[in-house]
Amino acid sequence: MALFSSNTKNEQPKKAAKAKPAKKVTTAKDDGRLARVLTAPWFSEKALIGTEHGIYVFRVPTDVTKTNVAAAVEKYFKVTPVKVRMVNLPAKKVSLRTRRGIGTRARRRKAYVYLKKGDSIELT
């Protein structure tokens, strides 16, 4: 039913469904910013166990994105990551054992980088 047109039927030509192109992975452009993306490798017991399975953990700044981390890993380690996951660690109250008594440990962020089977990164 057409309220504002002269057509009485909804006869509009159907458009052919287009196939969606494959999702293109875009990496961040390197204008010198990738040098500060991977601050340091994260050395903990859990992180070192993950390296056996191709999962590497890095400390990253709080404003870095997954795309930036993937681009930095590609540039500096010559390995393409399968996926990247980001974790925000909250600030915590810490006992200082001084007159002041309590302090605050800074909040942190880390990135889990998953690699293909057989790929590895040399951490020094």
Image: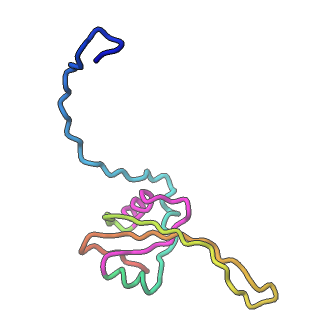
The spot of residue 56 in percent (x, y) is 39, 75
User: Left or right: where does residue 41 sit relative to residue 13?
Assistant: right
Give the residue at x 48% y 69%. 87
Number of numbered labels in the structure image:
0
Q: Which residues are magenta?
A: 53-76
Outermost residue toward the top in this view: 6
> Does 29 sit above or below residue 89?
above
The C terminus, quarter of image: bottom left
Give the residue at x 30% y 48%. 24
The spot of residue 36 in percent (x, y) is 53, 63
User: Left or right: where does residue 45 sit relative to residue 108?
Assistant: left
User: Left or right: where does residue 98 sit relative to residue 37?
Assistant: right
User: Residue 6 lies in what quarter of the image?
Assistant: top left
The spot of residue 114 in percent (x, y) is 34, 70
The spot of residue 61 in percent (x, y) is 55, 65
Queried whether the magenta region covers residue 111, the answer comes back as no
Give the residue at x 72% y 80%. 103
Queried whether the magenta region covers residue 73, the answer comes back as yes
> Does 53 sit above or below residue 79?
below
The N terminus, quarter of image: top left
Frontmost residue, 9 versus 84: 9
Frontmost residue, 105 versus 117: 105
Give the residue at x 52% y 68%. 88
Outermost residue toward the right in this view: 99
